[in-house]
């Protein structure tokens, strides 16, 4: 029996396809075989585009046969979170209001994957409109955590995280507004990167909170995350907030040690209420970094305690405007039983959105209302500026910040659905990075006694992904994480 | 009895003369085109699409602000104005709210000979909405259809101070505004195509009072005449209301041009809470010194400056200068024509422009830019007139041929033998023939009846087929009769 292709990294698969050691079609078929076997339990995908994928794979093989140069992700199967537009493919955002909506164009990140000869496997499940931390808010299905089907995969990019963890794909795209890549990455035991705001184009990412949203990769290795970032990152003329900067190179050298690297531990993150196993795993991970030669010191991010409340003013405010376009006029669900325009909006939106989305639209609408704007939105913006200042200050003393990705290990289905605030607090460590716009990732750093994955979060200053990824790859080499086997 | 005065401010929208929309690459030429033929993922608000600011729109907007003397803000911010309507694809309009790109300017208008300044509070950029169709030709639709050709077309909104005190002032302000905006090329201001639209805020107060009355906003004013009529109506309505002990309510009213009246559209209580906030998709617009310098350099000479130069430097009458600066194409035409004529013939150029060219342009509903011949030809025509080579009658004929053929008037005069005859011998010969053929008139003239010379000159002109120099003919007739 030859190598199981689904155990290989994207870097390795692309190299094999380029060298002709494996055909893109064989790579795709191996992953589909696994996907079809595990999907009934994991339910990571809202849509599997097998025919399209096999056609893409054959086109890659054909290109190679004709002597064409293959792209950086030649034949690599990639799953796409279902809030990114893939032309000709249904994009639902796991919402009834977009059921049946076929994308008219490719998101820039998707177009860049295609241009790099990646093979798109399908659209993954998420919390409706990326609002949630467990993927339980999907209007269509519940994705399970591959490590324990009784537990959530995290969210909102739960489908992408679970698909990569279950080895249905080596690579997936997600989006992160308050932790939606890093938190599910931690819960599913994979690498999840939230690039600097502006690093990856948001064009074609269905907006939740435009000033916080960022597209990023899930992978099982740090090198794969770096490769993916090099493909999807960089200036895009279609996104006015995308930065005029080149992304870091595809292949980052893995440093032998981390001598000279200064790592900060934010005092405010090691708080009462943090799960003891999470804290222990984080401290152990920090010792690994120290063992690699890094110097470790305490730093302070004094406005951390305002992060969640600031986020829950700003993100819903932006969402209330971003989601207003789902009005039943041009696409998606439309309730035709309405007699008046007003009623048509009420029925379409009332029936199309789930409870969490409605909650946030109402929160945001309220926060922006005349007479409340200064007290809520304007004040939250000022706090946000202070929080960005906290990080600037910290990064004048250290290169990276290390902390837990989540305050708890993966929780059970239904455990937090009745208490929105408890659910919101699940993102307490990830939200600050979105508010400050810097780069951060979650990397597996151990498991609970029960075998559940735990994540270490590393945060760098803006546009310092090279530093972030290279430190993470050294950590990965020192503390390899077991591949999921059912 | 209390006398009342009008207090009005105007909000004018002008479509910027760009090729593409404000936030996407779709064409702005959708007026009259097939519905939804100028659309893309961005201007139809497909999920995930993002706006990218059109740099040319910004340049044109800044030119308009500079021309109207507004202060330019180094940083301005695009905001989302949130409301639901089927013609607004994103359910928010991208506009500028508390940080517009320009503020504090004004425009001088002249009403009844007096010059007055109307302050301009601000100008900001925003995108247009689409339009709803309730019928298709004669067919009444069951529902409504949406045409998004216009959605995302770039606009500037020019908000005046409440400085307008009469409907004539409103009319004069709009005319002056249109002239300036068209001059700098920021907008074509074609009201029939909706490229210039106006709302009026109208209130009344007793003469002498300082406090403003409650204002009504009047919408649907799609011509200057509508603005004037609506303001007059609204003034009378509000005065009558106050006189009869009533109170003006703050509301939006719609002008009905057919019935010549305004009627209530929505009250203040129904007003939207637009929940403005900065659009996170668009970074603040930074107008640095280099950008402003570039826009300034591109700014053409403004009509008022041009008028002063035409009267001062070129010696034209105020009337001629007014006529010739009426639009930029006409002024440009004149300048080129004048440059091709000798200095002494500039006044003649102006006359030919005002009489021949404008008459013909107006008759054919064209602007000077569409004239079928080079402006230099008009300069040469003026030169021929000034030199006495052509009579004014001859000039008229030659102009007609220049228009039809586009040929240089010098060539036409030579080819057609249209040159005025000033040769003494030839003219004297015609005079002799005319006197003998009209003995009675000759005798009358000799007897002191000056009026008789008219028919004699006419006879000579007839003999010469119009080519004789009339001044010379007149002199020679007098000489012949007296000798």
Image (cartoon, coloured by chain):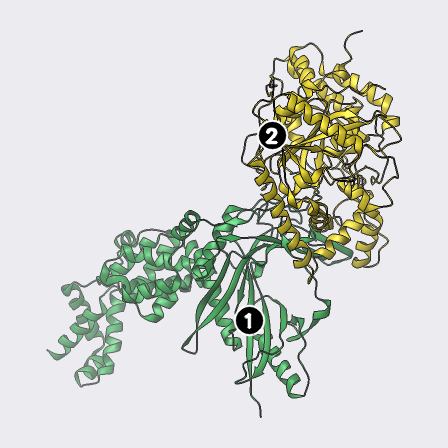
Residue nearest the observer in this picture, B272 or B43: B272
Which numbered mark, 2 or 1, is in the foreground of this view? 2
Per the image, the residue denoted by label 1 is B9
Q: Against A327, is A38 above or below?
A: above
Residue nearest the observer in this picture, B404 or A165: A165
Report whether residue B135 is seen. no
Chain B drawing hue: green
Which residue is located at x 22 percent, y 81 percent? B440
Report whether residue B418 is seen. yes
Residue A156 percent coordinates (x, y): 77, 37
* Furthest-left residue in this view: B483
Q: Against A215, is A348 above or below?
A: below
- Is disc 2 placed on a helix, strand or loop? helix
Packing grade of label 2 (10 A; few <14, some 14-19, many >=20) is many
- Quadrant of the image for the N terminus of chain A? top right
- Quadrant of the image for the C terminus of chain A? top right
Residue B205 percent coordinates (x, y): 58, 82
Chain to which the residue tagged by mark 1 belongs = B
Packing grade of label 1 (10 A; few <14, some 14-19, many >=20) is many
Which residue is located at x 55 percent, y 71 percent? B9
Question: Which picture quadrant has residue A169?
Answer: top right
Q: Against B381, is A233 above or below?
A: above
| Letter of the chain in yellow | A
Residue nearest the observer in this picture, A425 or B25: A425
Chain to which the residue tagged by mark 2 belongs = A
Residue B268 percent coordinates (x, y): 70, 70
Question: In the image, which disc is placed on residue A263?
Answer: none
Residue A298 percent coordinates (x, y): 64, 35
Per the image, the residue denoted by label 2 is A465
- Is disc 1 placed on a helix, strand or loop? strand
In space, the residues marked 2 and 1 are separated at their CA atoms by 54 Å
């Amino acid at each position: 029996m030859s190598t199981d292709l689904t155990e290989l990294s994207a870097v390795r698969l692309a190299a094999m396809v380029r060298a002709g050691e494996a055909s893109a079609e064989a790579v795709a078929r191996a992953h589909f075989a696994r996907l079809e076997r595990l999907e009934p339990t994991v339910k990571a995908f809202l849509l599997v585009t097998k025919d399209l994928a096999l056609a893409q794979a054959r086109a890659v093989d054909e290109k190679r046969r004709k002597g064409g140069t293959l792209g950086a992700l030649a034949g690599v199967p990639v799953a796409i979170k279902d809030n990114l537009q893939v032309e000709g493919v249904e994009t639902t955002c796991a919402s009834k209001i977009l059921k049946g909506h076929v994308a008219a164009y490719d998101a820039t990140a998707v177009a860049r994957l295609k241009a790099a000869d990646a093979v798109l496997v399908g659209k993954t499940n998420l919390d409706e409109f990326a609002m949630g931390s467990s993927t339980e808010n999907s209007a269509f299905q519940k994705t399970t955590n591959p490590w324990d089907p009784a537990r959530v995969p995290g969210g909102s990019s739960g489908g992408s995280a679970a698909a990569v963890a279950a080895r249905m794909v080596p690579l997936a795209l997600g989006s992160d507004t308050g932790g939606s890549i890093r938190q599910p990455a931690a819960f599913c035991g994979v690498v999840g990167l939230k690039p600097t705001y502006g690093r990856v184009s948001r064009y074609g990412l269905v907006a939740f909170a435009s000033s916080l949203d960022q597209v990023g990769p899930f992978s099982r290795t740090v090198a794969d995350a770096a490769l993916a970032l090099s493909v999807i990152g960089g200036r895009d003329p279609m996104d006015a907030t995308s930065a005029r900067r080149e992304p870091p190179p595809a292949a980052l050298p893995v440093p032998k040690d981390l001598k000279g690297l200064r790592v900060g531990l934010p005092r405010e993150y090691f708080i009462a209420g943090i799960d003891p196993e999470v804290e222990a795993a984080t401290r152990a991970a920090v010792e690994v970094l120290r063992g690699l030669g890094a110097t470790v010191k305490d730093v302070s991010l004094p406005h951390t305690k305002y992060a969640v409340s600031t986020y829950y003013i700003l993100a819903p405010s932006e969402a209330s405007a971003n989601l207003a376009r789902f009005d039943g006029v041009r696409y998606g669900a439309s309730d035709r039983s309405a007699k008046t325009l007003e009623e048509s909006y009420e029925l379409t939106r009332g029936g199309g959105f789930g409870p969490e989305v409605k909650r946030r639209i109402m929160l945001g609408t309220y926060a922006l209302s005349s007479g409340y704007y200064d007290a809520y939105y304007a004040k939250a913006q000022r706090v946000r500026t202070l929080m960005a200042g906290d990080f600037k200050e910290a990064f004048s003393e250290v290169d990276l910040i290390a902390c837990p990705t989540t305050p708890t290990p993966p929780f059970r289905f239904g455990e937090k659905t009745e208490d929105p605030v408890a659910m919101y607090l699940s993102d307490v460590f990830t939200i600050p990075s979105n508010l400050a716009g810097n780069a951060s990732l979650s990397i597996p750093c151990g498991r609970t006694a029960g075998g559940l994955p735990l994540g270490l979060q590393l945060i760098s200053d803006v546009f310092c992904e090279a530093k972030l990824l290279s430190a993470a790859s050294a950590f990965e080499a020192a503390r390899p994480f077991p591949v999921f086997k059912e | 009895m209390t006398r009342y005065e009008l207090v009005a401010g105007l909000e004018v929208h002008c479509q910027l003369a760009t090729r593409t929309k404000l936030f996407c690459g779709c064409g702005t030429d959708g007026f009259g085109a097939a519905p939804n033929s100028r659309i893309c993922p961005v201007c139809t608000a497909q999920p995930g699409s993002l706006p990218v600011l059109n740099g040319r729109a910004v340049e044109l907007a800044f030119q308009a602000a500079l021309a109207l003397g507004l202060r330019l803000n180094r940083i301005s911010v695009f905001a989302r104005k949130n409301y639901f309507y089927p013609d607004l694809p994103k359910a928010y309009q991208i506009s500028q709210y508390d940080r517009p790109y320009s503020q504090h300017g004004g425009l001088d208008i002249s009403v009844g000979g007096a010059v007055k300044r109307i302050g301009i509070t601000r100008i900001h950029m925003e995108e247009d909405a689409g339009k709803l169709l309730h019928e298709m030709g004669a067919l009444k639709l069951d529902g409504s259809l949406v045409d998004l050709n216009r959605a995302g077309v770039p606009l500037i909104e020019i908000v005046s101070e409440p400085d307008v005190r009469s409907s004539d002032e409103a009319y004069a302000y709009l005319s002056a505004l249109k002239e300036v905006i068209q001059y700098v090329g920021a907008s074509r201001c074609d009201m029939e195509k909706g490229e210039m639209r106006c709302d009026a805020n109208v209130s009344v107060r007793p003469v002498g009072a300082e406090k403003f009355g409650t204002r009504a906003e009047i919408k649907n004013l799609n011509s200057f005449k509508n603005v004037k009529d609506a303001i007059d109506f609204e003034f009378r309505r509000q005065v009558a209301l106050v006189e009869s002990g009533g109170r003006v309510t703050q509301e939006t009213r719609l002008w009905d041009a057919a019935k010549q009246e305004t009627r209530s559209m929505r009250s203040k209580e129904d007003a939207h809470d637009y929940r403005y906030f900065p659009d996170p998709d668009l970074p603040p617009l930074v107008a640095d010194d280099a950008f402003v310098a570039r826009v300034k350099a591109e700014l053409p000479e403004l009509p008022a400056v041009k008028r002063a130069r035409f009267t001062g430097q070129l010696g034209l009458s105020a009337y001629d200068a007014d006529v010739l600066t009426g639009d930029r194409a006409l002024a440009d035409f004149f300048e080129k024509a004048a440059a091709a004529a000798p200095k002494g013939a500039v006044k003649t150029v102006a006359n030919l422009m005002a009489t021949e060219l404008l008459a013909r342009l107006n008759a054919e509903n064209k602007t000077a830019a569409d004239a079928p011949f080079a402006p230099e030809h008009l300069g040469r025509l003026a030169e021929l007139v000034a030199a006495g080579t052509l009579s004014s009658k001859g000039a008229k004929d030659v102009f007609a041929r220049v228009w039809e053929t586009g040929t240089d008037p010098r060539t036409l005069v030579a080819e057609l033998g249209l040159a005025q005859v000033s040769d003494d011998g030839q003219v004297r010969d015609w005079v002799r023939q005319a006197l003998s053929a009209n003995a009675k008139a000759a005798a009358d003239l000799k007897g002191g009846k000056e009026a008789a010379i008219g028919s004699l000159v006419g006879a000579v002109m007839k003999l010469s087929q119009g080519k004789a120099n009339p001044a010379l003919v007149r002199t020679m007739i007098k000489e012949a009769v007296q000798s």
